[in-house]
Image: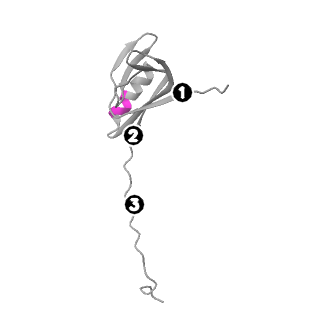
């Protein structure tokens, strides 16, 4: 029998609401576009760093990754979850390439 691991990454652009939880953790609830609720326990220290990064960056995105856990009443839990907030870099405009015909080039 093949062993399969279900991993999940939830992306967000607004910090989810955090609720204090036991053992220096915070509980985060994220709802996807279909109304499915994902519950994740994150280390409080990681949460504080994510909050600080979101404040420091003018344009940012974030993600929570972990293993897809048990089904809950409204959705699923994310086990061994981690959080990351990253700065979105402005895309550099592409330079326009103009074709130069061989006739226009001096010999």
Residue 76 position by quadrant: top left
**Earlier-in-chain disc, 3 versus 2:** 2
Choose top left, top right, bottom left or bottom right for residue 104.
Answer: bottom left
Calculate the distance from the C-alpha at mark 3 to the C-alpha at mark 2.
21 Å
- The magenta stretch spans which residues? 51-55
Q: Earlier in the sequence, mark 1 or mark 2?
A: 1
Q: Please tell me whether mark 2 sits on a helix, a strand or a loop.
A: strand
| Residue 7 image position (x, y, % from top left) | 52, 28
Q: Position of residue 59 (x, y in %)?
A: 33, 40
Tell me which residue sits at (42%, 79%) in the image. Answer: 100
| Magenta-span inclusion, residue 53 | yes
Gap between marks 1 and 2 measured at Cα:
27 Å
Separation of residues labelled 3 and 1 (CA atoms): 38 Å
Q: What residue sits right under mark 2 in the picture?
A: 87
From the viewer's perspective, tell me whether residue 77 is left or right of residue 6: left
Please tell me how many numbered marks the rendered image carries. 3
| Residue at image mark 3 | 94
Q: Residue at x 40, y 73 (%)?
A: 98
Where is residue 43? Give x, y as percent: 46, 19
């Amino acid at each position: 029998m093949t062993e399969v691991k279900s991993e999940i990454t939830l992306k967000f652009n607004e910090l989810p609401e955090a609720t204090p939880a036991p053992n220096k953790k915070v509980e985060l609830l994220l709802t996807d576009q279909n109304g499915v609720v994902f519950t994740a326990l994150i280390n409080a220290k990681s949460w504080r760093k994510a909050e600080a990064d979101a404040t420091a960056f003018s344009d940012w995105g974030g993600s929570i990754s972990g293993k897809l856990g048990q089904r809950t009443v409204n959705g699923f839990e994310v086990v061994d979850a981690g959080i990351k907030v990253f700065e979105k870099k402005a895309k550099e405009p592409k330079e326009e390439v103009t074709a130069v015909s061989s006739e226009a080039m001096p010999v």
